[in-house]
Image: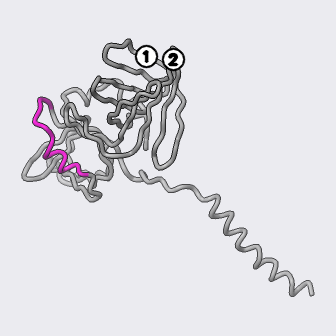
Amino acid sequence: MMRAVRPFVLLALLPVFAGCQLFNSKPVDSNAGLTRLQGELVSANDQLIFQPCVGQQRYVVRDGTNTTLIQDATNMPNLPGKLFADIRGSFTSAKTPGTEGEVQLQQLYRLERSNTACKDPNFKQLTVHANGNGPAWEVQASGKGMIIKRDGQPDLALPYVEEQVGEGRFSLSTEANHQRIELWVAPQRCTDSANGSVQHLGAELRINGQVQRGCGYFGGARND
């Protein structure tokens, strides 16, 4: 009898072992093999060329994921400043010196007119940046806390608590001077009404229940 039972027991345990392997498997990194770079966009020979802030290699932009970058670059208001872009993709360097490589675009974080964005000393420390208009406001969050700037108000430097709410949405919350301050962020294409810049996050600044809407992007300290 024992010889007949043992195979049955082993077969019964197989789904359990398979379930353990599935449960213990590591999550897939959607950014594996991709690089995030900041730089300038220029048009040449009917192509969009990306020149990183650091280095001499230039890359022809191939937008295979329909990020709207090419259309956004075409429609960007003709304001003073270079066309700055913060992107993630698969970069392939040119095999022949002096020619362009290629970047298969995966994610657009930010597109704006700026002569100083490449030299922003705070970018690498930032986790999230958000801003809005009417009246103007700005939030800079890092691992050390967040700074809140508003027209007509003194700057506030405060600690915060981050809460994930699913589907890439999250909030940063804090309390100061009997005020409840929250920054709510969600992944969505957002256009700044003041300068036409495009950012990859929609943002809401809530202070004591009053809501001001704007746009946001991940800083260099966040690898989402």
> Which amino acid type corresponds to the residue marked 2 in the rendered image?
Ala
- Look at label 1 and name its amino acid: Leu
- Residue span colored magenta: 68-81
x then y, percent, for residue 5: 86, 83
Q: Residue at x 34, y 19 (%)?
A: 150
**Among the 4 quarters of the image, the one containing residue 192:** top left
In the image, taking residue 222 as reference, residue 163 lies left or right, namely: right
Going from the N terminus, do you reach mark 1 or mark 2 first? Answer: 1
Element carrying mark 2: strand
Please identify the quadrant where the C terminus is shown: top left
Q: Which residue is mark 1?
A: 156
Q: Residues within 10 Å of mark 1 (few under 14, many from 20)?
A: few
73 or 20: nearer the eye? Answer: 73
- Residue 123 can be seen, yes or no: yes
Percent of width and height locating residue 162: 52, 34
Which residue appears at 46% of the width and 43% of the height?
169
Residue drawn at (41%, 27%) of the image: 210
Q: Do callouts 1 and 2 mark residues in contact (Cβ within 8 Å)? A: yes
Residue pointed to by mark 2:
176
Locate the N terminus by quadrant. bottom right
In percent of width and height, residue 113 lies at 18, 33
Find the residue positioned furthest to the left: 45
